[in-house]
Image (cartoon, rainbow, N blue to C red):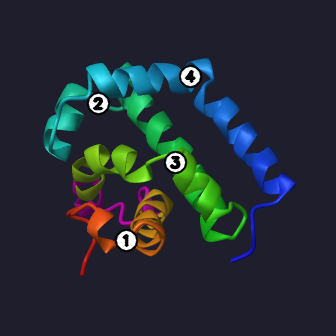
Amino acid sequence: MNKPTRQDADLMLKLYQQFEADRMRAARKWMATEFQVSTYERFVERHPRGSEGFDHFTGFCGFFEMIGTFFKHGLLHPDLIFEMWYINGFYGPVYPIIDGWRKQGDKHIAENFEILALAELDWIAKVKGEQYVPTVPYRKR
């Protein structure tokens, strides 16, 4: 793959501004302090649609879904994304909820977020070595 361009860097700066915006900052804080569920059923019980928790969760996942969509279409350079953010650190904690949500019928929920997380695992193997790739339940080997 080619080296990142100034255009790539400019887009990353814009994404970082969104990452640091008040709404995303609040969602990240909520994820770090309030999000303490490990099943979809428990999540919807504690954070039903329309609740502040549901909004934080979907906003958090939506941000990374957007990045995953850009990535999937070749609009973001993997070196910039994966050197800046540890995507699996964000995807891992939400995966059980996403998996449960999919089992309820919405099979496409967060699919680009997952594509991004899986691509990062491949990137880690290629750039840092297979021994640095974390074991995650969503990576089928």
Task: Determine whether label 1 and label 4 are within 8 Å by CB.
Answer: no
- Give the residue type that dot 4 points to: Arg
Among the 4 quarters of the image, the one containing residue 27: top left
Q: Mark 4: which secondary structure?
A: helix
What amino acid is at disc 3? Phe
Relative to residue 93, is residue 10 drawn left or right? right
Distance from label 4 to label 3 (Cα)? 14 Å
Residue tagged 4: 23
Which element is circle 3 on? helix
Q: Residue 107 lies in magenta, yes or no? A: yes
Which one is in front in this view, the residue at disc 3 or the one at disc 2?
3
Point out the tag, 4 or 3, that comes first from the N-terminus: 4
Q: Crowding near pointer 4: few (<14 within 10 Å), some, many (20+)?
A: some
Q: Is residue 30 magenta?
A: no
- Give the alpha-carbon distance from disc 1 to disc 4, as whole Å: 36 Å
Q: Name the N-terminal-most of marks 1 and 4.
A: 4
Magenta segment: 100-111
Amino acid at dot 2: Pro
The residue depicted at 82 percent of the width and 60 percent of the height is: 5
Q: Is residue 59 left or right of residue 104?
A: right
Foreground residue among 27 and 51: 27
Residue with the mark numbered 3 = 64
Residue at 69% across / 70% down in the picture? 74
The disc, 1 or 3, on the residue closer to the chain's N-terminal end is 3
Residue designated by label 1 = 129
For numbered disc 2, what is the local secondary structure?
loop
Q: Which residue is mark 2?
A: 48
Nearer-the-camera pick, 103 or 92 = 92
Using the rendered image of the protein, determine whether residue 133 is visible from the camera's viewpoint.
Answer: no
Disc 3, disc 2: CB below 8 Å? no
